[in-house]
Image (cartoon, coloured by chain):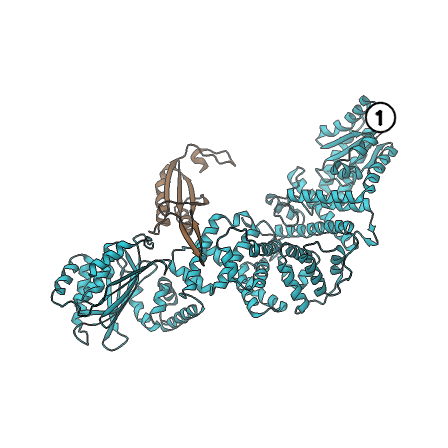
Chain colours: A cyan, B brown
Amino acid sequence: MGAAPDPVGTLRAEYEALERAYSAGHHGVWAARRRAGLVDVAIAELFARAGAPPGTAVAAVGGYGRSLLLPRSDIDLLIVHEGVDGDVVSGLADALLYPFWNVGFDVGHAVRTPEECERARDRLDAEAAMLDVRAVGGEPSLVADVRRRVSSWAGRDPRRFVAAIRDDAARRADRFGSSAHLLEPDLKEGSGGWRDLHAIELIVGVVGPGAGGTALLRSRERDALDGALEFLARARSALHLETRKPSDRLVLDHQPAIAAAMGFEDEPRLIAIDGLMRALFEHARQVEFTLRTVIARFLEEASESATVPTTTGAALGALADAAEADREPAAALLDATEDLDPPEGGAWTDDERSAFLRLLRAGPRGSASLEILDRLGVLDRLIPAWADVRCRPQRDPYHRFTVDTHLTATLGAMGRILVDETDDDPVRAEAVKQVSDRDALLLGSLLHDIGKTGEGGHVAVGSRVIGPILQRIGLPDHTASLVRFMVSQHLLLPDTATRRDLSDEDLILDVAAAVGSQERLAALYLLARADAEATGPAAWTPWRATLVRELVAKVQRVLERGEMGPEVAGELAARMDRLRDLLRDAPADEVDRFLSRMPRSYLLTVEPDRVARHVATIAPPVGAREVRAVHLEGARAGASELLVVARDRPGLLSWIAGALSLAGLSILSAQVFTTTDGVAVDVFAVEGAWEDEIPERRWREFRGMLRRAVEGTISLEYRVNEKRRWYPAPSVTVPVTVAIDNGASDFATVIEVGAADRLGLLYDITRVFADLGLDVHLAKVATYEGRVVDSFYVRDALGRKLADDPADVERAVRRELA
Amino acid sequence: MKLVTAIVKPHRLDEVKDALREIGVNGLTTTDVEGFGRQRGHTEVYRGAEYQVDFVPKVRVEVVVDDAEAQGVVDAIVKAARTGKIGDGKLWVTEVEQLVRIRTGEMGPDAL
């Protein structure tokens, strides 16, 4: 034994030498063939040493049969015999297999007669493996017999054979997903991977290179397949060498090592691992598409497309016809489309535009057609920015697909959402009715992530590149502006809903200002749904849906009521600009801090020049028991403006009202606001109850009274009642009215009280609220000819609107005013 | 060791995270959850389409800490998650019997 070298030991050494000779990323087809050659030598030697009897042979099948062995591939053997005695054959098998097993090679085997081979091909994988049968040792005629039997059987019914391959590819795609866009693809079984490549070769092998005059495989496709084979061989080999196992799933953990081994380096807009994945996706897409096309070319009945399109517009039109009729486009049409060589760039023709929009409207077939256009390189020509998102991987917890696949999937989802009446989303149907421009919805879905080009900030990039795209397409203004809006704001709803406080009225107003119209709001909602649906199951959970819907409903009502909209938003922006100008001497960050603290309602009701006068009083931090009261010149002669600033607390408004009335000051109007950090800013227009010019002593008296009321050292109630005894009851008879409206605002209950004017009326009403624990968030007080109409926006102690049946409140107010 | 579990408003998560990082907590787990407490579900209306929201979206934060740090973590979460309005959530502390760092096999407080 000792003298003769052990063939498998030698093989092991040769494998290792090969591994050392090339870096891990450069074991391509050549190395795979070399490995198969080395195995051939070892098997032939073992076969000879085993003293195999006549009538036996050993053959390579499967990948080994094709002479493609990757570093950790199984070696599949077929031992063929002509009915030789069972013991003899099993002795031969032992002599061949044990040496391999002992050294740790994975060797698979079958022992059959040629007749048994013919019967064994009931399974496609066995049949496919035997189609690659190749003699390695023993009698070549036996192996030739096997090949003849199997391939003639396959060739007798090529349609059945090709259909079986098609079905098998579909099953694999279903089970393993696609190598053409999954972030952790299976390089062997995934669609577009190694097995699909082999499937194409099998079809070409069985059917022959041409059928019915047209080539089954075009020369460009042949080149692409060769490139894909080399790439996949290298990637799979690198994975085998990296993991020391026959792994075929390219998981994230291994991608950096594989990328480095294959020579991918970080580039400005594409990191190395993304470069690797992008290259893989490009190859896998070609394989996926070529397999589909080859099958279609072969299985297609006599070509139905009578006219071959000669312009891109006509080709798109023919694709749209097929999509609308819900049928696969003819292979001949795809070939003709690929052969078109339209002039580069420039505006779209009317034909192109109308056919493209028809494709967008055509549902699943339409989005499938866009993928075909992508594979044919037409989409790049129509939308040059598409090239930047093609095959680009996305690495975040949500996305599973490349950017471009995600975009076509979003289009598909939008198409479904627009028409799917079985969808149980309560907001969907109403939102769909809101948007009259479906082309904009579809195009906005297709292009919403067009800014994901690796330059960071994809929304900003998208907003920049969408303009030229829309210009080339040449869309009506309304459509173009809605698409532009969708691209630039597609994250507004989901981001705001999940990260911000939806009970903050100013937030809702800001979102409403950014959205501007009910149609746009509906468009963003539908896009958020389609985007999520196309992203993966984690993106639209009931959790997220609830939050996004709450935001949409609140913004919708704000827009509906006109509390915010383009005009109001413009007005608000103009006022802020004006204010910044007035305060230009103050440090800009202090002004910004002030603006961010103030509720939008304050900025919208108080004129900028008056706000400028308020800043000094409002801006400095307010102590717990501090009360600042400043009177300023009023809007008209005889009236003064009174500004009171204090930490907000229940009862504050009633104390101010009580102190004013005790000091002989009449309230003409009152507006109360609360800053985001809980400071009450109350603005009153007051006049003297007894004189035209308010003497300074009355202000002093007011301030003293208010301070003591806040400190709790006097009873305002007692004093007001005392004082009231000396004055007659109101002479006019005005009925007391109390109207409570829970629907006017999402954030507060509106209570409107009408009554005859009397001394301390506002004090009485607000004290009732304070007793009931209600916080007055906004108040509008107006007095007309002895009649007062006051509206109060109130919330309960927990910041909620009142319960649905606030009868207690009405009763208490009526009792007080009776 | 203690497991501190808090149910907080989604928009307070960043504050809670920052507060915990500030006191040196270097790991936590969050989950999107839905439920209701006193802040029951409610009816939403969008353009006349009414629908019931039975469960309110919240975020569950879980932190395992040494006994000595538990109170500090509780205080930090409560302070960061409080808005003073209904629905600020709840927090509870439970005993942890054993802890293993899967990578190394370290156990108990070593695995924190």
Q: Quadrant of the N terminus of chain B?
A: top left
Badge 1 element: loop
A329 or A408, nearer to the observer:
A329
Q: Quadrant of the C terminus of chain B?
A: top left
Q: What is the x, y in percent for residue A625? A: 23, 58
Give residue A136's quadrant in the image.
Answer: top right
Q: Residue shown at 23%/56% (left/top)?
A: A812
A186 or A147, nearer to the observer:
A147
Q: Chain of mark 1?
A: A
Q: What is the x, y in percent for residue A386? A: 63, 60
Q: What is the x, y in percent for residue A708? A: 17, 60
User: Mark 1, residues whose alpha carbon is within 10 Å: few (<14), some, or many (≥20)?
Assistant: few
Q: Please tell me whether residue A353 is drawn above or below residue A547 in the rendered image.
A: below
Q: Report whether A661 appears left or right of A361.
A: left
Q: Is residue A754 visible?
A: yes
Q: Which residue is mark 1?
A: A83
Find the residue positioned furthest to the bottom.
Answer: A637
Give residue A143's quadrant in the image.
Answer: top right
Q: Report whether A100 appears left or right of A633.
A: right
The type of residue carrying mark 1 is Gly
Q: Please tell me whether residue A254 is drawn above or below residue A82 in the rendered image.
A: below
Q: Residue shown at 41%/34% (left/top)?
A: B96
